[in-house]
Image (cartoon, rainbow, N blue to C red):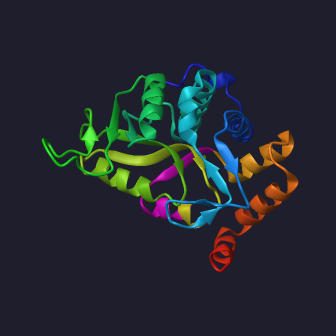
Amino acid sequence: MMHPVAAAVPDAAAIARETAALLLRIGAVQFNAETPFTLASGLPSPTYIDCRRVISFPAVRSRLMDFMTVTVQRAAGADAFDNVAGGETAGIPFAAMVAERMDLPMTYIRKKPKGYGRNARIEGVMAPGQRVLLVEDLTTDGGSKLSFADAIRETEASCAHAAVLFSYGIFPETTQHLADHGLTLHALCTWADVLEAARADGSFDKATLAEVAAFLAAPRAWQDARRAR
């Protein structure tokens, strides 16, 4: 069944603009060109986003979970799923909220087996043949999505769709990498949307935004130049 607020949810472009503005409003976005952040890969970046902050802002999280639910249902179909699975750990609360909206069972996936008891990666009940929506907070290159999808498929359930609040959107190989693994990615917004929103509301100075734009246009070159210093 389509989420009942579907008619009130705007189109994809408006969702991207509003999501970016909301992430800025709650302080989930940070830019620092002078002292770059270090990504999990060890590479430098002038951008950082913490989507986990969303859970602490009731009105924002409700709006964004409505967006995620409707975005996925519009793309995949109102009855495309039988189970909603959250990736450990950031995806777990978002999966719970989406599952509630879709009136579906919810499960979660460990990054690795817990090492005792059933030694399981899947927590909750996931049955063979179920069509599972994977939910996480964000994606960079999509690597964790592949591992979580594999864990779902090992139960003989299927996983063809992954939903996130935010996708970096600057690594062109990500979408193809996921597609090659049988996954379609649904993201509410990207860095390009956030940069546009930041320019509109004056959150950061022009020099910082120019450096961020340079990074987003050619992230590998920007990182290589920083490492060479």
**Foreground pick, 58 / 150:** 58
What's drawn in magenta, residue-wise?
175-188
Q: Is residue 32 above or below residue 194?
A: below
- Splitting the image into 4 quarters, where does residue 133 fall? top left
Q: Is residue 154 visible?
A: yes
Q: Is residue 66 above or below residue 4?
A: below
Residue 205: percent from the left, percent from the top? 85, 50
Residue at (68% x, 60% y) in the render:
35
Q: Is residue 79 visible?
A: no
Q: Is residue 53 above or below residue 226?
A: above
- Splitting the image into 4 quarters, where does residue 82 fall? top left
**Foreground pick, 100 / 196:** 196
- Splitting the image into 4 quarters, where does residue 91 fall? top left
In the rendered view, does 138 fall on the left or right side of 10?
A: left
Residue 204: percent from the left, percent from the top? 81, 47
**Foreground pick, 88 / 47:** 47
Residue 45: percent from the left, percent from the top? 64, 62
Residue at (78% x, 62% y) in the render:
211
The answer to whether residue 179 is magenta is: yes
Q: Residue furthest top?
A: 4
In the rendered view, does 121 fall on the left or right side of 27?
A: left
Q: Residue furthest left?
A: 117
Residue 103: percent from the left, percent from the top? 42, 22
Q: Is residue 217 above or below residue 190?
A: below
The answer to whether residue 108 is magenta is: no
Quarter of the image with the C terminus is: bottom right
